[in-house]
Each structure stands twice: as C-alpha cells, then as structure tokens.
Image: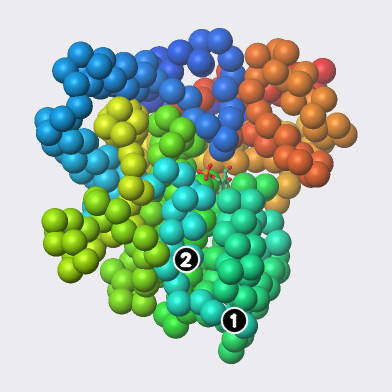
Amino acid sequence: MQGTWSAGGSVVLVSSDALRTLRQGFPVLERSAYLNAGTCGPLAWATADALGDAMARATVVGRAAAYYQTLQATHARLRAAYAGALGARPDDVALTTSTSDGLARILAALPLGPGDEVVTSTDEHPGLDGVLLALRAARGISIRAVPLADVADAVGPATRAVTCSHVSWITGERAPEDALRTVGRDVPVIYDGAQGAGAVAVAPEALGCAAYAGAGQKWMCGPVGLGMLWVNPAWRDALTPLAFAYGNLADPAAGLAAEPWPDARAFDTPALSAETAVAGATAAEHLAEVGWEQVFARGAGLADLLEAALRERGFDVAPREQTTLLSVVVDDPPATRDALAAAGIVVRDLPGRPYVRVSTGAWNDERDLERLLEVLTA
Ligand SMILES: Cc1ncc(COP(=O)(O)O)c(C=O)c1O
C-alpha cells in the first residue's frame, strides 16, 4: 500500500470500498479519532448485536443441551476466525481469555525448574513479566532480561526458554524474528503477540516459535475476555498443561482415565461463554471479509505516514518498525493524553515513559491523523 502526505498536509492513502464500509461499522469513529486499539479495539454494532442476540436467546430459551451445542459450534467458529488472522490451522489454536492468560498457560506447561534460565526483554508488559515472576517464586527459574533487539544473542547454555513481545507495546519495535527463528530450533520461543495478532501478518509456524499468545479485545476488535494461543504441534510432547477442565478432555466421561485433546484444545480456557465467543467471532470475521492483508497494510501504512509527518514537524518518534503502533515523545504524556481526549482524540500514555502511544488500525482514516497532528502542533 502506498501513501504520502500531500503538500497541504493531508494524507493520501489508497482506500478500498471494503475499508470505507468497515469504518462505517464502528460507531465510536463518528464521535472520536479513536487511536487506541493497542489497548482495546473499536467495537462494531454487528459485534454488539451478536452478543446481545446470544444473550437474549439464552435468557428466553434457557441454557441446557442446545446452549452447549451452540457453544461448541461457536468455539469452533471463533477458533477458525483466529486461525485465519494468524495464518495458522484451527487445530493449533487454543481459545483463551486474554494474552496474559495464554502466556500463563503455555509458560506453566514448560518443564522449567530451579536454575533454568528464561531470557526475556526489559520492556515487557506486566502480562508477561507477571508470569515470569510467578515461575521464579514457584519453580525457582532465573530470569535474564535484555533489550528486545538482543534477546536472541542473550541465549546461553542455561537458557531453557525465550519469551518476549513480537511487537513491543512501548515503541512498536519488532522482536529479532530471524535470529529467534534459529534459536527456536533448540529452545522454545514463546511470543507475546498482544500487539501482533490482528495487527501484522504473523504466520507463527514460519516464525519458528513454540507458541504465540494474542488478544481478542485489541486488534481483533472483540469484547474483553477473549484471546488466542497458537501452540506448535512440534513442541506438544515437551509441554504439560497444568490443569484440564471438561472442554480440554477428549473423553470427559472417562474420569481419571480421561486424556486431553491431542490438539490445542488441551490449552483452552475452561469458561468462554457462547455470548462472548459469538461476539469475538463476528468481529474477527468482519475484518477477514475486508482481507487480512489489506487490514495489516492499511494499519501499518497509516502509522508510517504519521511517523513521517511527525518527524517532518520536528517531533521525536521512538524507533519502531512496520507495525500499527507509534510512540511520540512529549513533555507531559498524561497532560497531552488529556488534551487530545478533550479534542476527541483517543490515545494512551505509558507509565514512566516519555511517550503518548498512537494505535492505527485499518478502520482509521487520514482525518483521524490530521486531527491528532493539529492538536500536537497547536
Ligand atoms: C505486549 C502486551 N502483552 C500483554 C498485554 C496484556 O494483554 P491482555 O489484556 O490481553 O492480557 C498487553 C496489553 O496491552 C500488551 O500490550
């Protein structure tokens, strides 16, 4: 996708009819320049309707066998939708309640014990840091944290796993994918894909990772309480999920003789309502209709254009790559966030960092970026 800032300051970016229709489905975009999908994506009316309809049906009809049949079918639909966004097979995708949930499930399933080293980066989200802290307390692992660009180089003889962001939530920088692909041949690499899934092309098998955790409420535009965990079948034998519930077992009636599903369903969260799942599937299918390649190109294309425009105007932008996040240096991030909010522009600040972070999705348009620039340069 090509785009430039015209001499007059407006963004010119190729935009298909499908993208224009997509934008119209998100009511929040009529009220504000919503640039915050890195926290939570915009919700479409179609998503809210799907959730409301499912809840109404359960309310009127009750929740018995038919409810659970629908639930299973809806889970399969959601799994397929998430697999489509990741570029993966549905059998390899577990349904979780969040990125953090997926990271906890997969890291706890690794055979990590006292002294085993886990390499991570110094800029991880608490959703990942928290799991590592818990594993240090419970299992005695040691944690080695280095800048994201250096995680592959930090791997040594004591390293038993590497886990880091695929896309940094602080800057929009990407992990050193090529070097980690090599590492991943011997050591499990677990990506935190909260800012990757639905935002950039992932293709986890090609990344050579053991697992990839993503969120449903961010770039997939679903409700809070949804996530995905891709589990590489090649690593399955090395993983022991810590808890199985009804849905994780191939034959739950077998009691203590029951076996887990041989695919990623062994990692599913035990409780994902049909209402939440149908909303998440509707949201993801909506984006898939536009075409994931278009969605990825448009989102990152807008961030690239914004970066160029900000730099041209003398702003410092944190080093980033072709992703949907951009962090701009400002004197007082909370005050800038609030000033932007007062003008109807939604971004976030990052605690302890000199940035406001802008998230650009396929649903954003040139005017959203211009509004941001107008306030920042005022
Ligand atoms: C890099 C990263 N990891 C993890 C999380 C936590 O995501 P979730 O709320 O889906 O657990 C976030 C959320 O902002 C994030 O940006």
> Left or right: 80 with respect to 339?
left
Secondary structure under badge 1? loop
Quadrant where the image shows the C terminus: top right
Q: Which mark is residue 253?
A: none
Residue 18, visible in the rendered structure: no
Kindly report the distance in space between the C-alpha atoms of the residues bearing marks 1 and 2. Answer: 14 Å
Q: Amino acid at mark 1?
A: Pro
- Can you say whether 284 is above or below 202 in the image? above
Residue 228 x %, y % = 38, 48
| Contact between labelled residues 2 and 1, with CB atoms less than 8 Å apart | no
Q: Please report the residue visible at 37 percent of the width from the left and 65 percent of the height from the top.
A: 241
Q: Please report the residue visible at 44 percent of the width from the left and 83 percent of the height from the top.
A: 186
Residue 59 x %, y % = 25, 16
Q: Nearer the viewer, residue 76 or 354?
A: 76
Residue 323 x %, y % = 54, 46
Q: Amino acid at mark 2?
A: Ala
Q: Please report the residue visible at 57 percent of the width from the left and 35 percent of the height from the top.
A: 39
> Left or right: 159 with respect to 144?
left
Image quadrant assignment for residue 134: bottom right
Quadrant where the image shows the N terminus: top left
Image quadrant assignment for residue 372: top right
- Can you say whether 253 is above or below 318 in the image? below
Q: Please report the residue visible at 37 percent of the width from the left and 60 percent of the height from the top.
A: 243
Q: Is mark 1 within 8 Å of ligand 1?
A: no
Q: Residue furthest right?
A: 331
Query: Which residue in the structure is indicated by mark 1?
Result: 114
Q: Nearer the viewer, residue 373 or 52?
A: 52
Q: Nearer the viewer, residue 101 or 252?
A: 252
> Left or right: 141 with respect to 235?
right
Please rate how many residues cluster around mark 2, counting C-alpha atoms within 10 Å: few if below 14, some from 14 to 19, many from 20.
many
Query: Which residue in the structure is indicated by mark 2?
Result: 108
